[in-house]
Every structure is written in structure tokens, then in C-alpha cells.
Image (spheres, helix red, strand yellow):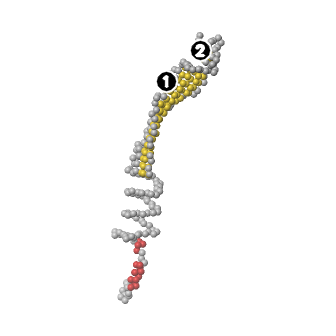
């Protein structure tokens, strides 16, 4: 049925109906902004009460972004400018610093060339550790003040004493040529041609290549001339066999005298 235009009917009721519909309308419940864009100015604010903001394109912020609460980022996050973190930071996965990146935390420095600094201790790119007068090298050598350790394990203290594991089974070597060392069976101390040797059950004092005094389970023996420059006392002495004359004797004041025949 077609619309009948009654010229006697007023348009005012229809105008009021449309005005009420306009007043009660919520045109932004489902709105769209085209090429013209959408601008908020003069102190205006966009408030999202209990909904959300979804950006599937690009969000560009040229001013200051102030965010509080929990912020979740997924995917790749790129920060090209300075980053200041004043609160507690927790990293729950690997941390990779690309080439050219230097990490500084107080007196700690980690450099991309492999060097580092921890207070007074430094690590060079080759792995050398230095702190004060101490040095530890990757080849095993080290220096602690006036004590030096070489790659063979020799420990040199100052300029006069060396602990040398390459001599016999280990030796303490002095700059004047004296040594204290051990081999498979003895501990020896010698200087030039003189030596003191201690073995299991035997002790020997050697004055040169042939003269020595040795004490073992069988007694004390002297090899070489026995000379006394003062009184010699012997508490126990064997007597001469029957029919034999001794060539020495003890007098009343415990002196040993030679019998001249």
C-alpha cells in the first residue's frame, strides 16, 4: 500500500520523534574513522573504562608514554635509544648482547672483546687475570708479589729460592747452589761436595766425596780419618782379647790415649 500524503497532517510529531531518537542515540558504540582521521585536542582525553584497545596496524607515540601495572610484550621488541631501568629486573631466559655491546654494573664491566673488570680485578681479551700485583696467565704461569710460578710448575720466591718439581722428585733450590731434594728413597740436603742424606733407617753426613759418618741399625760408622781437637769420651768400649795389647787406653780422667810401642 502506498504512502498517502495528507497535507492537513502536521510534520511536528515526526520531527519530535526523530529529535528524541537523536538525543538517545549512541553513535560511537560501533563507529569508524576513515582517511580524515580522529583528533583529540584542547586537553581532551580518551578513556577506556572497562574495555580494551586493539591496534592491528601501527601505533606511533611522539610524546611521553606513561604506563603502570603489568605490561606484556610478545614478539620482537626493539629499543634504539637509551633505556633506564630503576626497579628490580628479572631475566628468565638467555641474555645476548650483540657485537659492540658493553655491560656495566657498578664496578663490573663486561666488554664484547672478551675482557672484563670486577673491581680491582681485570681479565684481558686473552684470558690474563690481574689484580693488584697478582697475575694469572692462561698458560698456567702466575705471579703473586715476589712469588712467580712458571709453566713447568717451578715456584720462585724472590731471587734466592726456587721450589722445582723438575729436579729429581722435587727440590728446593737456592741461588748459592745449595739444594734440598727428595728422590724415590731419600731426602737430601747438599752444598757443593757436602751432603746430608736421610733414608728409611739410615742417616749419613758426608763432608766430601769420600769422608762420611753414617748411623743405621748396625751402629755408627766413620769413613775417613777421625780427628779430635778436644776431649773425646766413650762410655762403652770393648777390651782387648787375651794376649793382645791395645793401642789405645782410657786414663783416669776419661781421656783416650795412644799407646806408643
Q: Which residue is rendered at x = 44% and y = 45% of the image? A: 121
Residue 142 visible in this rendered orientation of the protein: no
Residue 80 point in image, percent of width and height: 37, 56
* Total numbered circles: 2
Which of the two marks, 2 or 1, is nearer to us in this view?
A: 2
Q: Does label 2 or label 1 sit earlier along the sequence?
A: 1
Which residue is located at x 38 percent, y 88 percent?
9
Depth check: give the residue in front, 36 or 108.
108
Residue for point 40% across, 81% down? 19
- Please identify the residue farthest to the front as the structure is shown: 253
Give the label on residue 193, or none: 1
Q: Quadrant of residue 24?
A: bottom left
Name the quadrant of the C terminus: top right
Residue reaching furthest to the bottom? 8
Above-or-below relation of 207 to 138: above
Q: Residue 45 or 131: which is nearer the viewer?
A: 131
Examine the rendered structure and indicate whether residue 31 appears above or below residue 187.
Answer: below
Q: CA distance from mark 2 to mark 1?
A: 32 Å
Residue 44: image quadrant is: bottom left
Residue nearest the viewer, comparing 230 with 72: 230
Res 128 → quadrant: top left
Residue ID for mark 2: 258
Which quadrant: the N terminus? Answer: bottom left
- Residue 122 lies, in percent from the top left, at 43, 45
Amino acid at each position: 500500500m502506498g504512502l498517502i500524503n495528507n497535507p492537513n497532517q502536521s510534520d511536528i510529531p515526526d520531527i519530535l520523534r526523530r529529535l528524541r531518537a537523536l538525543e538517545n542515540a549512541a553513535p560511537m558504540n560501533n563507529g569508524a574513522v576513515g582517511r580524515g582521521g580522529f583528533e583529540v585536542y584542547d586537553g581532551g582525553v580518551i578513556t577506556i573504562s572497562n574495555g580494551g584497545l586493539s591496534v592491528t596496524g601501527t601505533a606511533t607515540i611522539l610524546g611521553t608514554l606513561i604506563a603502570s601495572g603489568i605490561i606484556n610484550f610478545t614478539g620482537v621488541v626493539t629499543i634504539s635509544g637509551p633505556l633506564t631501568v630503576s626497579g628490580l629486573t628479572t631475566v628468565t631466559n638467555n641474555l645476548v648482547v650483540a657485537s659492540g655491546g658493553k655491560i656495566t654494573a657498578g664496578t663490573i664491566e663486561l666488554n664484547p672483546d672478551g675482557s672484563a673488570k670486577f673491581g680491582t680485578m681485570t681479565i684481558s681479551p686473552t684470558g690474563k687475570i690481574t689484580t693488584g700485583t697478582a697475575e694469572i696467565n692462561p698458560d698456567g704461569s702466575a705471579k703473586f708479589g715476589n712469588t712467580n710460578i712458571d709453566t713447568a710448575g717451578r715456584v720462585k720466591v724472590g731471587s734466592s729460592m726456587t721450589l722445582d718439581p723438575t729436579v729429581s722428585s722435587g727440590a728446593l733450590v737456592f741461588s748459592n747452589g745449595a739444594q734440598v731434594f727428595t728422590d724415590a728413597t731419600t731426602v737430601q740436603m747438599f752444598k757443593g761436595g757436602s751432603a746430608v742424606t736421610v733414608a728409611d733407617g739410615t742417616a749419613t753426613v758426608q763432608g766430601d766425596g769420600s769422608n762420611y759418618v753414617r748411623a743405621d741399625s748396625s751402629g755408627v760408622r766413620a769413613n775417613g780419618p777421625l780427628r779430635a781437637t778436644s776431649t773425646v769420651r766413650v762410655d762403652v768400649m770393648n777390651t782387648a782379647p787375651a794376649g793382645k795389647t791395645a793401642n789405645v787406653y782410657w786414663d783416669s780422667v776419661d781421656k783416650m790415649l795412644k799407646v806408643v810401642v
